[in-house]
Image: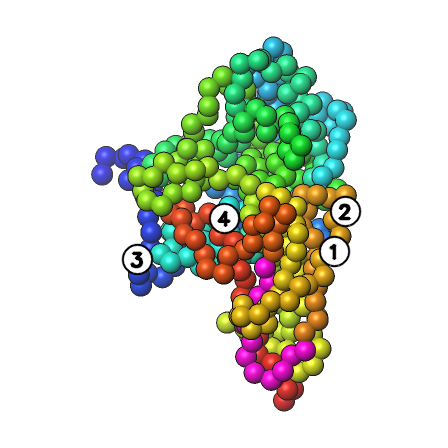
Amino acid sequence: MDGRIGDISAPGRLAGPAEGISTEELALATRNHGLPLEALRYELSPPGLHYVLVHYDIPAVDADSWTLTVGGRVRTPLALGLAELRALPAVTRRVTMECAGNGRALLTPRPVSQPWLVEAVGTAEWTGVPLRALLERAGVDPDAVDVVFTGADHGVERGVEQDYQRALPLAAALGEGPDAPEALVAYAMNGGPLPPQHGHPLRLVVPGWYGMAHVKWLREITATDTRFTGFQQDVAYRYRQSADDLGEPVSRIAPRALMIPPGFPDFMSRARVVRPGPVRLEGRAWSGAAPLAAVEVSTDDGHTWHPAHLDPADAHPWAWRHWHTDWTATPGRHLLTPRATDTSGTTQPLHQPWNRGGFANNLIQRVDVLCAKAT
């Protein structure tokens, strides 16, 4: 070897037919964690239970000297310290955030990466400055096309050394359009300072978009007059069917419903045990592409479906909603399944479409339940 970075950074690949989870994937799963499904009972996810994905290292941060710059195709470049940002008018938004790779480990063949099951989600209240306000203060030039966000996390991925960077089209960054979310430069989570793993001291929050857009440890915002083609934009986070497919970009969150597993679990299999009789089934549902329309529940592995009660929409259009229904459990094995449909008519699939990156895998959740009398 001659010391090239590529020697330690493997290209993307698919697992072989009989290949189990690798040591590298296990290491990723140890660093990054999902929401324990029983924590769906919380309307707001406590920061330590909210899902976490860190691409590289959690960077060392000196908050006292931290500066956010806003530059590129703007009339008045900005350099703002945390005290200056906190002095600006603030807003708080309740937002459900989901990793784009949620469900990846359930695919066949499995893309080799962070092996999420279904728990890569969380909902928090984020407080900060609207991105639009910062861009208007800087004065974006008429020829600007994209707004690029650069984090302080630095690493190598598929042979490419990089800072983590993502971009939004200018219209999305400005929140233009009737259903466009208002992006936020956030410095607080659930009323407290951002924890280190959630981007302290600053992160981007883009309601309705998958987690890759919510750049953590945010230090630069740059307006560009050409489309951004960085690694995380044009190589990663695209729907592809093959390695040479240019693909389509990952953006808004597909509808999903998750159930709080009822009863109590087996330690290894996580199969559930309930007693015969009435059982309340409940969970959360969300969509970033359109408002939720309905949640249905099956207790026979999708053969029949029954409507669940979905809590009314409230003042938090970008947050999950609670649903519930009642079930009379009878002795034996059961597969319980919720599914969500949004107002665009999109319903969770019963059979998962496949893509090479393992993105937007909103296949219905299946909860294995044994109904047994107490011993």
- Specify the farthest residue to the front: 345
Circle nearer the N terminus (1, 4): 1
Please name whichever residue, 66 or 13, is drawn nearer the observer in this view of the structure. Answer: 13
- Is residue 158 in the magenta section? no
Residue 311 is tagged as 1
Give the answer, above or below, for where 130 lies relative to 40: above
Q: Residue at x 38, y 43 (%)?
A: 240
Amino acid carrying label 2: it is Asp
Circle nearer the N terminus (1, 3): 3
Per the image, the residue denoted by label 2 is 314
Give the answer, above or below, for where 248 lies relative to 372: above
Amino acid carrying label 1: it is Asp
Do callouts 1 and 4 mark residues in contact (Cβ within 8 Å)? no
Per the image, the residue denoted by label 4 is 360
Residue 16 is tagged as 3
Label 3 and label 4: CA atoms lie apart by: 22 Å
Circle nearer the N terminus (3, 4): 3
Span of residues in magenta: 328-339
Image coordinates of residue 289 in percent, x first then y, are 59, 43
Label 1 and label 3: CA atoms lie apart by: 43 Å
Q: Residue at x 64, y 27 (%)?
A: 176
Image coordinates of residue 178 in percent, x first then y, are 67, 32
Label 1 and label 4: CA atoms lie apart by: 24 Å
Please name whichever residue, 363 or 13, is drawn nearer the observer in this view of the structure. Answer: 363
Do callouts 1 and 2 mark residues in contact (Cβ within 8 Å)? yes
- Specify the farthest residue to the top: 75
Amino acid carrying label 3: it is Gly
